Amino acid sequence: MAAVHIAGHPALDFIGTLSERGSKDVEELRQPQDLMQWFIDADVVDRPEQATEHDLAAARTLRASLFRALESWKRGEGVPDEHRLALNTASTSGQPRITMQPDQSIVREGTAQQCLGAIAASFLQLIASTDPSQVRWCADRTCTHPFIDRSRAQRRRWCEMKSCGTRNKQRELRARKTD
Ligand SMILES: [Zn+2]
């Protein structure tokens, strides 16, 4: 399955690699290769190094901390120390290396840990520079994806129109008919 990049921010998309938390727990990062492919698709790195099962486990742990931190931040509560420190550890443990090649192309190379560092750092930048009301949870009952609403009207409800939006509009239509 191709990774989906719809949330308007890489850290929010990364949180969205697990869907339907607490119900179906649909996992997009099933094996180490999925993780590195995700980083390429998310434009975090061009030449990733091989990831291991250990990297995959670390990625899922960081993702859980990002999710909890986002929840707390959105509620206006402090991010619990456990998750705050996990984000700090990741964000200070390196970033992909960026260099200019002999052919003048710019290439980013990195390990899974460095890519996770970039995600954690970008999340911290996001919450430093964004109003919590602009980052929202998909209005679908089970989806659990966050996104940034960059629309002028600020009325975006769904992480993705063609999945959650369509499903819910059909549901609303059916409910109206049976009323
Ligand atoms: Zn959704």
Image (tube, helix red, strand yellow):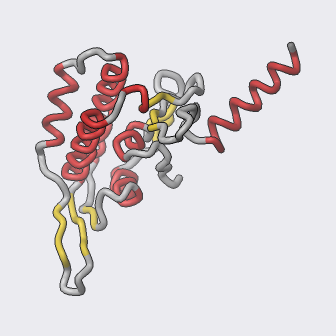
Q: Which residue lies at the image location 17% right of the left edge and 42% below the top edge? A: 91
**Residue 75 in picture, x, y percent from top left:** 36, 17
The image shows residue 140 at horizontal and vertical percentages of: 59, 27
**In the image as oriented, which residue stretches furthest toward the bottom?**
103
**Residue projecting furthest to the front:** 152
Q: Residue at x 34, y 27 (%)?
A: 70
Residue at left 31%, top 23%? 73
Quadrant the C terminus occupies: top right
Q: How many marks?
A: 0
Q: Position of residue 155 (x, y in %)?
A: 57, 31
User: Residue 59: x percent and y percent?
Assistant: 29, 41
Q: Quick check: can you spot residue 36? A: yes
Horizontal relation, residue 149 to residue 14: left or right: right
Q: Considering depth in this image, is 105 or 40 the residue closer to the camera?
A: 105
Let me know if residue 54 appears in the view: no
Residue ID at (31%, 17%): 76
Quarter of the image for residue 165 reads top right
Along the line of sight, which residue is nearer the eye, 42 or 135? 135
Q: Is residue 50 above or below residue 80?
A: below
